[in-house]
Image (cartoon, rainbow, N blue to C red):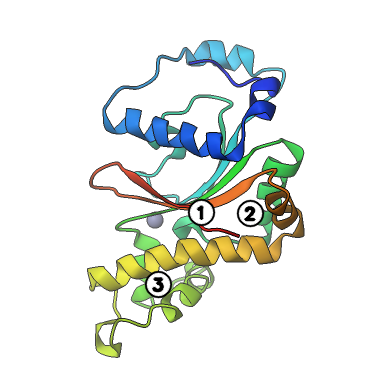
Amino acid sequence: MRTLTKEAQQNLTPDQAVQVLKEGNQRFMNNLKANRDLLQQVNETSEGQFPFAAILSCIDSRTSAELIFDQGLGDIFSIRIAGNVLNEDILGSMEFACKTAGSKLLVVLGHTKCGAIYGACNHVEMGHLTTLLEKVKPAMDRETDTPQEKRTGNNVDFVNNVTVNNVHCTIERIRKGSQILADMERNGEMKIIGGLYDVETGQVTFYEDAA
Ligand SMILES: [Zn+2]
């Protein structure tokens, strides 16, 4: 697998970038890792990097974007925070990845059995985690199928619905919060999509929401 060059990054369309991730996840699921010499990639990226995508995923030890999409050094910007929520600094990192460094795709990647979503659903309060989990509240409020008495972290269906809502809420917040990214997406320079990683199968399902 070749290390991305500036030219390869610039010639890639946002839809092709989605395809690269889909193929990478297929390789991962089939245990067909692309042949890469990481030390050679250290050398090839020493003068600069041209990643084609930025991925916001959870800190969960099972959701490393590079591994689950079978990517090498210099391929993707990896942004990680519990519950793949958003804040100003993450928005700034995304603007850097897309506007300054030329990435064509921004993915918000949730995952099943997420401890942060589970904690938010159980109204966990602990130190600085309390403020972080507050950010999952809008995704819980948007879940209107589950009756009051079943809205807890122990209800798998409720947690799953909130997990998916949380991906869509984060995407909406990116579009509302960053004029730079919203403009880039409107002009077709990049695309923002969601995804869900299944910790039992290793499969990523993409949600290609229209802006
Ligand atoms: Zn998680």
Instruction: Indicate the secondary structure of the residue bearing disc 1.
Output: loop
Task: Check if mark 2's residue and mark 1's residue have beta carbons within 8 Å.
Answer: yes
Task: Check if mark 3's residue and mark 1's residue have beta carbons within 8 Å.
Answer: no
Residue at image mark 1: 81
Q: Give percent across and percent down for residue 188.
A: 68, 46
Foreground residue, 110 or 47?
A: 110
| Above-or-below relation of 6 to 171 | above
Residue type (three-letter) at the residue carrying disc 2: Ile
Please give left or right for residue 29 compared with residue 165 in the image. left
- Pick whichever of labels 3 and 2 is earlier in the sequence: 2
Can you tell which mark lies on residue 138?
none
Please give left or right for residue 95 compared with residue 170 in the image. right
Does residue 126 appear anywhere in the picture?
yes
Residue type (three-letter) at the residue carrying disc 3: Ala
Residue at image mark 2: 90
Residue at position x 44%, y 78% in the image: 142
